[in-house]
Amino acid sequence: MIKPRRRFQAGLESLEGKALLSAVPAVTPSTLNSVLKQIDRAAGTFAKTHNPAIFDAALSSISRKVPYGHDQLFPTWQDTEALYDPGTPGSGLAMVRQLKADLKDYVQSAVADGSIRMKGAWAGISNVASAASTTSGFAPILTSKTYVATLKQIDRAAGTFAKTHNAAAFDAALSGISRKVPYGHDQLFPTWQDTETLYDPGTPGSGVAMVRQLKADLKDYVQAAVAEGSIRVR
């Protein structure tokens, strides 16, 4: 009779273990990937509306898709929302990256401490950071049409300057042109102001050299901004 008891006890422990395991909420890779996409959609809407209350409400709802997410993850997301500054290029992208990193960190720690279960393998655990870098909802677009138009406006402004020799009017024209490029007035225009000093009415060819450098400044700015993800080209 002893052996049957032991078998019964072992079976009972197995059933208890299964019961305990079933009591732990599970999250699937499909759900987590869906959450990542919902973050992108909410961020894209926020980039257009600039309504922080609606964005916060969207994140609140999204957090409920993850077990205990509203209580444990959402407060962290609210802190992360503060990373966005409409006057700082790239801050929107940085915020979205961090929201996704927060999700990854929460899931990893919750699975590790046994408070939730992972059903299957989630690739997002390892590549969420790189996936976040592709999020572009907050990156303004510079079209090739706008880029070419900006080059032509530089030529026109320089032609007027060659006739009037009015440095203040030329500087004002460049200030206006720089606004055609995303973040151009803050990031590009100061460089253009330095380049203006290349022109010397007593030095033949200095005007051409200045215009050539203004265009090179534009090219360098766009290439750097695209590389860091603060603007997109189309």
Image (cartoon, grey):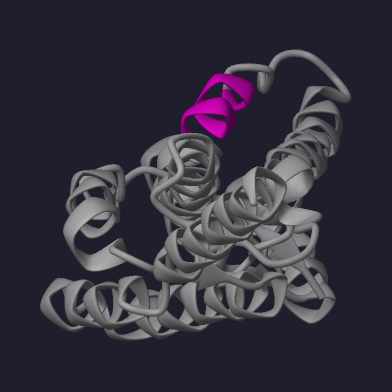
Above or below, 55 against 169 in this view is: below
* Quadrant location of the C terminus in the rendered image: bottom right
* 5 and 49: which is toward the camera: 5
Q: Position of residue 72 (x, y in %)?
A: 24, 52
Q: Position of residue 57 (x, y in %)?
A: 18, 80
The magenta segment: 190-196
User: Is 192 colored magenta in this rendering?
Assistant: yes
Above or below, 201 against 92 in this view is: above
Answer with the quarter of the image where residue 208 lies: top right
Q: Position of residue 130 (x, y in %)?
A: 76, 45
* 159 and 99: which is toward the camera: 99
* Observer able to see residue 174: no
In the image, farthest residue toward the left = 53
* Observer able to see residue 220: yes
* 223 and 44: which is toward the camera: 44
User: Relative to 120, is 82 on the left or the right?
Assistant: left
Answer with the quarter of the image where residue 188 lies: top right
Above or below, 161 against 30 in this view is: above
User: Residue at horizontal 59%, vertical 52%?
Assistant: 5
User: Residue at horizontal 74%, vertical 74%?
Assistant: 149
* 158 and 18: which is toward the camera: 18
User: Relative to 179, is 126 on the left or the right?
Assistant: right
User: Is 2 colored magenta in this rendering?
Assistant: no
Q: Main secondary structure of the magenta part?
A: helix
Q: How many marks?
A: 0
Q: Position of residue 100 (x, y in %)?
A: 52, 53
User: Residue at horizontal 17%, vertical 59%?
Assistant: 71
